[in-house]
Image (cartoon, rainbow, N blue to C red):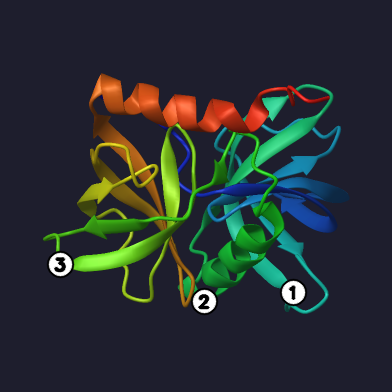
Amino acid sequence: MKIIDKRQFPRAQVTFPVDCVAGNLKFHSQAANLGGGGVFVHSPQRLLPDAEIVIQFRPAKHLPVVKVKGKVRFQLPGLGFGVEFQGLSEITRQALLRLIHHRTIGHRNNLRVPLVTQVSFGDGQALALVKDISIGGMFIETRHPPPSGSPIQLRFNLDPDSPVVVAVAHVSYVVKAAGMGVQFVEIQPEDQRRIQAYIDQFFKPDASA
């Protein structure tokens, strides 16, 4: 069974000022959502799709100011617009991904739950630890991840007594010195149901309450 996930990088809710320049238009606004590939800017300004823009922001006090070109990819009337970064340096992208990874631990919107287990990937010789899992993917702690975009085969257990889950995935993003986020692209329906059941148990009401 194939799973389609359109988002390449993780995202986090943020609140920091953004300076925008789109043609002759200059304005100040605020970021509402940040990813490794772009940012959502909360603004009443209306910009055309694919409009070129230059944005400048400081994502956190301990990080330097980021100035990057981008393109407007969508507009939400009354709310703002989404910008895709163009030409963002890999050093800056890694800094953003580390920030997002830190902020989103335990706060994912797609029902990502803790999972501590070993996972084998690649040729089956590489072993790593899973940090968490969702119905669409997982974060794997490893200091030697394949490059972003690489296809990999995963083998892991949800618990010691359960059958091995086998999934084809691709590396969505890499956080240096931390690990990699992977997205499942092919997985058996039964394994998908078992992952969902594993996730659901974290959200069941406490029977003793």
Mark 2 or 1: in front is 2
Say whether marks 2 and 3 touch (CB < 8 Å).
no
* Position of residue 47 measured from the top left corner of the image (x, y, whole percent): 70, 33
- The tag earlier along the polypeptide, 1 or 3, is 1
Indicate the amino acid at tag 2.
Ile
- The tag earlier along the polypeptide, 2 or 3, is 2
Foreground residue, 59 or 176?
Answer: 176
Q: How far is mark 2 from mark 3, CA to CA?
A: 29 Å
Q: How far is mark 2 from mark 1, CA to CA?
A: 13 Å
**Viewport quadrant of the C terminus:** top right
Q: Name the residue under label 3.
A: 125
Q: Which residue is drawn at the image coordinates 78% and 21% (left, top)?
A: 77
From this viewpoint, is residue 182 visible? yes
Indicate the amino acid at tag 1.
Val
The label on residue 91 is 2
In-image side of 205 versus 101 (left or right): right
- The tag earlier along the polypeptide, 2 or 1, is 1
Q: Which residue is drawn at the image coordinates 65% and 54% (left, top)?
A: 105
The label on residue 7 is none
Q: Mark 1 points at which residue?
A: 65
Q: Residues within 10 Å of mark 3 (few under 14, many from 20)?
A: few
In-image side of 14 versus 108 (left or right): right
Point out the residue furthest to the left here. 123
Point out the residue furthest to the front here. 208
Indicate the amino acid at tag 3.
Gln
Q: Residues within 10 Å of mark 1 (few under 14, many from 20)?
A: few
Q: Which residue is drawn at the image coordinates 21% and 52% (left, top)?
A: 152
Mark 1 or 3: in front is 3
